[in-house]
Amino acid sequence: MSMETTAWTQLHSVLNAQEERRPFARATLRRIGAFARPHRHRIVLFVLLGVATALLAVATPVLAGQVVDALVSDGDQDTVVRLALLIALIAVVEAALGILGRRLSATLGEGLILDLRTAVFDHVQRMPVAFFTRTRTGALVSRLNNDVIGAQRAFSNTLSGVVSNVVTLVLTLAVMLTLSWQVTLLALVLLPVFVVPARRMGRRMARMQREAAALNAAMGTRMTERFSAPGATLVKLFGRPEEESREFAERARRVADIGIRTATAQSAFITALTLVSALALALVYGLGGALALRGTLEPGAVVALALLLTRLYAPLTALAGARVEVMSALVSFERVFEVLDLKPLIEDRPDARPVPDGPVAVEFDDVRFGYPSADKVSLASLEEVAALDTRGGADVLHGVSFRAEPGQTVALVGSSGAGKSTIAQLLPRLYDVDAGAVRVGGTDVRELGADSLRGTVGMVTQDGHLFHDTVRANLLL
């Protein structure tokens, strides 16, 4: 793989990183460690494979230089064959380690994704209905997808990359300085020409990628809203199809413009890397060749220096962006933990009891209730607002009391907004009362277990909803 292609591959992994300048949160790191602990043996093996791969990557150019020296000095055939076989063996081992490392990386990354997604999904399942009425579904799903995947990159990419790149860089510089410190120092003169544009291009493309992600999210939200059954009905009844088409096309056009700008910037960057590669190799061949002709440097050393140079700039570029990668992964972890730290308003008590056996009565005793404000049930980032609304909590039920005996039919009649649906939602504990009590079989529903209460209370919702599953699965929900 050429130097510019390798460097671009390394740089591309940080293009979506957020350049946040904030210290590491120790609490976050401890929680990351808790998720990583079950995978610690794989992590250690993964790092060791990265070190071994870095050692083999440096060994091949040195052996190639020795082959050239053997040819120039009229060495015996056995030496050349032995060196060639050794190079072939290293290539085979390197390929095997690459496959093993890729499988280990996938196992580690997917295992972490499984743990994080399961934890977030289970936690979200426990959140009250108020949480789902406030948050944007797309933002919540993004935590389960984008942020979880961003977090796992810290293990599958950054961890191994930093270790292997450091080892590769140190070994490459050590070997190059041993072969010719003059050529090495002059080759490093081009380092700023390589690293500085790489960092600037990375920042520029990161901004474009974030803009594209935001535009794609907005376009996806619009499609989700318009393609749902209620949204499609509204558009057909009251919408303006031409206006909808125009607005969607405008959003899609902006995404296309970002894609063109990104592709152009990538092409310009790779072209610049190609130029730097050519200049660096020309410097090595020119100065190294001159020293070889004077007899102060072996011809094989010139070839080894040229090959080692191709393995020098890529680790430098990757390490230059390592901090941004780490911070990006840390941000992803914090966004996942932000959801996990949101405490559900409704939870079973440790000593929760089952609903009493037999026919049970339903009693509302001086119930007072107000829907909770957003700051108690949601997150600003999930509602895509700067700060959560603190309004709310005003009573919508004022001292409601009644009793329904077993076998008795009770109808709640009133105008829209009178509180009929609210009363119905308090019985299965979709919300908890602010004062008073709702009792089933003489026991406050807050003292009953959720599973037992669900098994006792049946409810037919006003709007029927079916999951994309079998009829049996929907009936068993």
Image (spheres, rainbow, N blue to C red):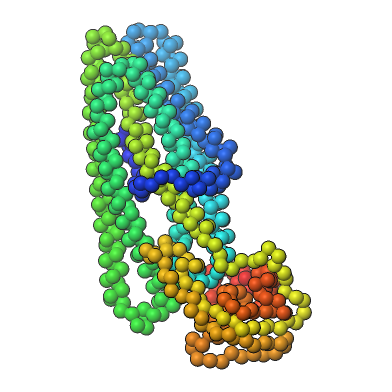
Q: Is residue 325 above or below residue 429?
A: above
| Depth check, front residue: 398 or 350 | 398
Near-viewer residue (167 or 250): 167
Residue 421 rendering spot, x and y as whole percentages: 55, 83
Q: How many numbered circles does the render carry?
A: 0
Residue closest to the eye, 391 or 97: 391
* Viewer can see residue 89: yes
Q: Which quarter shows the N terminus?
A: top left
Q: Quadrant of the C terminus?
A: bottom right
Left or right for 85, reference 405: left
Residue drawn 30% across the image and 79% down it: 240
161 versus 469 height, above or below: above
Kindly identify the residue that appears in the image at 40 percent across and 24 percent down: 171
Give the side of residue 367 with respect to residue 210, left or right: right
Q: Closer to the camera, 69 or 142?
A: 142
Q: Is residue 3 above or below residue 253?
A: above
Q: Residue furthest right?
A: 358
**Residue located 32% across and 21% down the image:** 305
Residue drawn at x 42%, y 63% is 380
Q: Is residue 64 visible?
A: no
Residue 394 at x, y percent in the picture: 48, 79
- 99 is higher (above) or lower (below) than 341: above
Picture coordinates of residue 399 (x, y %)?
A: 58, 85
The image position of residue 330, as x and y in percent, is 44, 47
* Quadrant position of residue 289: top left
Q: Is residue 203 left or right of residue 37?
A: left
